[in-house]
Amino acid sequence: MHTLLLTLEQLHSSGERRLLLITGEALWCCQQAQSLWQEHGLWLGYGPEECRPHPQKQAQQRLGSEYSRVVFNGYSGVHPDMLGACGGMVQAGGLLILLMPPLASWPHFADPDLIRYVAQPEDAAACHSYYLQRLQHRLLASPTLWHWDQQAGCSLPSHQDSPTWL
């Protein structure tokens, strides 16, 4: 955790925006994201009351705003458009935090967002999220992915020396 906090300070100084993928059990993921929370942040999906969580569908209403931390709780559903919009809400030196189940369970994850594609909610269980499959593939292929897993710990590729953000 200490290394992560130091790296976040460097991130802020360089003005670079980053994604931090936190994977594990839902409660554990929320606790880790809460430990990184900042007052001027946005939490979308289920989360601790003190972080003032908002439904993910409200992400579009916040377009044009910037936040130092944006937490996107994938346990509340992974709507591709909302996740993409959140990437644009992260201010310079900020962090987009994506909370998800362990990587090995993504192919079987019952994504709550799939309900919007079916006539009956119970039919969502038969759906497969090709978006999650592609997202997982792209994230794992990234040599710069910041990943904090409940079992494996925190993996932070070295932060290259970047010029100080003015």
Image (cartoon, rainbow, N blue to C red):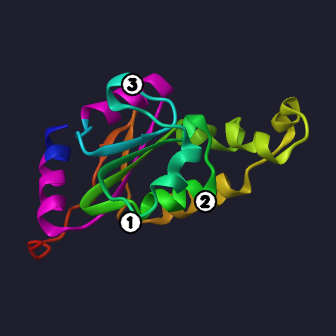
Determine the CA span between mark 2 and mark 1.
24 Å
Check disc 3 and report its element: helix, strand or loop.
Answer: loop
Name the kind of residue labelled 3 in the image: Pro
Task: Name the secondary structure under disc 1.
Answer: loop
Q: Is residue 160 above or below residue 43?
A: below
Circle 2 residue: 81
Q: Which mark is residue 88?
A: none
Question: Residue 48 got which mark?
Answer: 3
Q: What range of the chain is rendered magenta?
A: 6-35
First in sequence: mark 2 vs mark 3:
3
Point out the frontmost of discs 2 and 1. Answer: 2
Residue found at the far front of this picture = 61
Question: How many other residues sit within 10 Å of disc 1, few (<14), some (14-19) or many (≥20)?
Answer: few
Task: State left or right for residue 119 relative to residue 130.
Answer: right
Left/right placement of residue 64 relative to residue 140 reads left
Locate the C terminus and report the quarter of the image it occupies: bottom left
